[in-house]
Amino acid sequence: MEKQMMETLEGIYQKCEANGDNLITVLQEVQHEFGYIQEEVVNWFSERTNIPASKYYGVITFYSQFHQNPRGKNIVTVCCGTVCHVKGAPRIIAKVREDLKLKEDQDTTRDMLFTMERVNCVGACSIAPVVLVNDKVLGKVSPASMVKSLKEYKE
Amino acid sequence: MSNEIVVNVCMGTGGIAAGGSQVMEAFISELEAAGVENATVKEKCRLHKVGCRGFCARDVLVDITINGNVSTYQYIQADMVPKLVKEHVVGGKPVSDWLVGEDYHTFHDNQTKIVLADLGKIDPESIDEYLAVDGYKAAQKVLDTMSPADVIQTIKDSGLRGRGGGGFPTGVKWSFCAANDSDQYYIICNADEGDPGAFMDRSIIEGNPHAVIEGMIIGAYAIGASVGYIYIRAEYPLAVDRLNMALKQAKEKGYLGENLFGSGFNLQIKVKLGAGAFVCGEETALIASIEGERGMPRAKPPFPANKGLWGKPTIINNVETFANIPQILNKGADWFASIGSEKSKGTKVIALTGKIRNTGLIEIPMGMPLKDIIFNVGGGIEGDKLFKAVQTGGPSGGCIPQQHIDLPVDYEGLASVGSMMGSGGMVVLDETDCMVNISKFFLEFTQAESCGKCVPCRLGTKRLLEILTRIVDGEGREGDIELLQELAEDVRDSSLCGLGMSAPNPVLSTIKYFRHEYEAHIKQKKCPSKVCNKLLTFFIREDMCIGCGMCARACSVKAISGQVKQPHKIDNSVCIKCGACFDACKFSAVLKE
């Protein structure tokens, strides 16, 4: 592990230790810093805190917010709430996957430009179906409008 | 105040998604440029951002008030702002074309607002505005003049029941907790609103965060807690920001921290971000998550009121429950108990969504008939479609059909037809929605969110989903309905926590009221609502097809053939029924049957 990375991890450790934060907060901080949670980071924390790595993995795999693989530059989040579902979210997912050329078990494009995710509900049901591209909320989308919206992120 | 001009812009998540920030920026720059009566507008005009005002379908909503006369505008976009400023703010004449219509008023007039009363009126980012509407008066009164027992008695007398789903009487819960002898008590606000189709808690926190904090102060005093937590979904960034801001302001004013209101009572409140697990809405799972563990529920008893966070007596209430508390103490238990139905007092905030005209956030007195909610407040079904059912209570609730449309909406009423209040999401479905598909949708959700601790929920939901999947795929078998019912009842009766106990509700209620749709899928291999693609046949109407070739390009298996400018054809022996051609056709020439 590089020295700089170790310093970053030590910083997170010290901060969380001082605040009395729990394991979830530690992992949230790690993910905020690196975008995902690498194996070597878990091992480093495991040694530093004397908590078995299995305990970290138990938490990481339980919560959907934690990622163990690097994610794309742009995150396309399709809302799959009830209203979005009845207003066509499944067709939007199919179109986005086709447009991004994602294979069945794949959520991130090979060029690391996009990751497609689903979210249970963003609570913007009045403008369903809803898709988030990074932090931008797109309302009343259609399969065709999604293809158009994604175009500007491809350049 | 009388000569003042006030501009309110809706800046809830709905408002922002519809372009609220751009509208706000446009107002800032336009007001800067304009002038009124020899003064710059900036001196005379107050520009406000306000929280959700309910009618999200009409966003961005803007209020312009001059000398106390309020004009409300709907569907406002940034490019419309210059005209509003020029003609109304400066010129004094409302732009009549953009004003809200009669239906905006019927939407509001049929509601009773307690929790939502100040939403859309005050700036959620300013504690002074909350103070101007009697904010923190209840907390001050409680700490100055009431004993914890008095507070609990008042809440008991009001008849307030938990708004998070279970409907347990809040005052009784508090008294259970206070009865413990302990060196430490905790109070937790559950803002882990995970139900798809629900945004009540988010809107309340975004629109009036101080009301929730004040409710927590009162609750903490009643049970003797000096530490509180607000457990909120990380998917609600705006709500989290406004909450943190409100906590900071309250602390600066001395309403949080040490020696609150000079009474000697201490309370600190911390925010805990959820990490994306629906089951953490369950009390014991939420506690495990705050402790940094996997959010798995445990068997009750002991209840959290006796043994909760870190093993200490803990009260967990929902956002809306807390937001009711200050009002009850300000206006009295009798006032609160006079609203609502016999066993369910007060109001309920509901996220009214789906195939309905007036989508948005509403607040109605408990016991209002379902019919009035949908057709008066909601304005009826979108388009010219027929009402089919209303889904209440999210994945834990059920679907209520036409025949029960007169049902009073309160805890008992909804439970009597196999649904539940849940946190208050209400999704209206019309004739084009397939009930088997809806049932499968919810099972996909609960199956994915099952924590896996107990067998009935972990395996039962999986098997239920398998059966439902084969039914919508056209592979349903004779006896599947009975099998679903039997399994669903077993899962309901033997699961460890509320998630598993209520997960079968969507299946059981749709079978009960829409059995014929299940039968059509299984026996005739047809989807009457034309939703389940695998049971449909796609074809092209020759008289409608102009031969543009869009469908052929969309088809991934090359099942569509035809010459340019000639009607195309679908080869059904090749078609995989994905529906891409149906979406691609701009001339409604692709049909499904």
Image (cartoon, coloured by chain):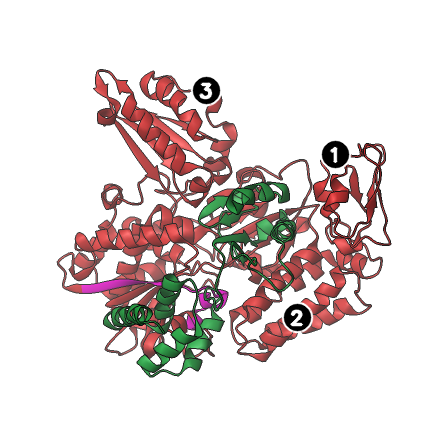
Chain colours: A green, B red
Could you tell me which secondary element the residue under label 2 belongs to?
Answer: helix
Label total for image: 3
Q: Nearer the viewer, mark 1 or mark 2?
A: 1
Judge by depth and name the residue closer to the eye, B366 or B335: B366
Measure the alpha-carbon separation of dots 1 and 2. Answer: 43 Å
Residue B318, x across and y down, in percent:
40, 60
Say which residue label 2 marks.
B488
Measure the alpha-carbon separation of dots 1 and 3. Answer: 36 Å
Label 1–label 3 contact, CB within 8 A: no
Q: Is B307 within the magenta?
A: no
Q: Nearer the viewer, mark 2 or mark 3?
A: 3
Position of residue B181 in the picture relative to residue B306 (left or right): left
Residue B179 in the image: above or below residue A150: below
Density class for disc 3 (Cα within 10 Å; few <14, some 14-19, many ≥20) is few
Per the rendering, the mark at residue B253 is none
**Which three-letter amino acid code belongs to the residue tagged 2?**
Ala
Could you tell me which secondary element the residue under label 3 belongs to?
Answer: helix
Q: Earlier in the sequence, mark 1 or mark 3?
A: 3
Say which residue label 3 marks.
B96
* Quarter containing the N terminus of chain B: top left
Say which residue label 1 marks.
B587
**Residue range of the region highlighted in magenta in the rendering:** B266-285
Position of residue B220 in the picture relative to residue A114 (left or right): left
Q: Is residue B29 visible?
A: yes
Picture quarter containing residue B15?
top left
Residue B497, x across and y down, in percent:
51, 73
- Mark 3 belongs to chain: B
**Which three-letter amino acid code belongs to the residue tagged 3?**
Ser
- At a point 46% along the width and 62% down the height, the residue shown is B167
Label 2–label 3 contact, CB within 8 A: no
Density class for disc 1 (Cα within 10 Å; few <14, some 14-19, many ≥20) is few
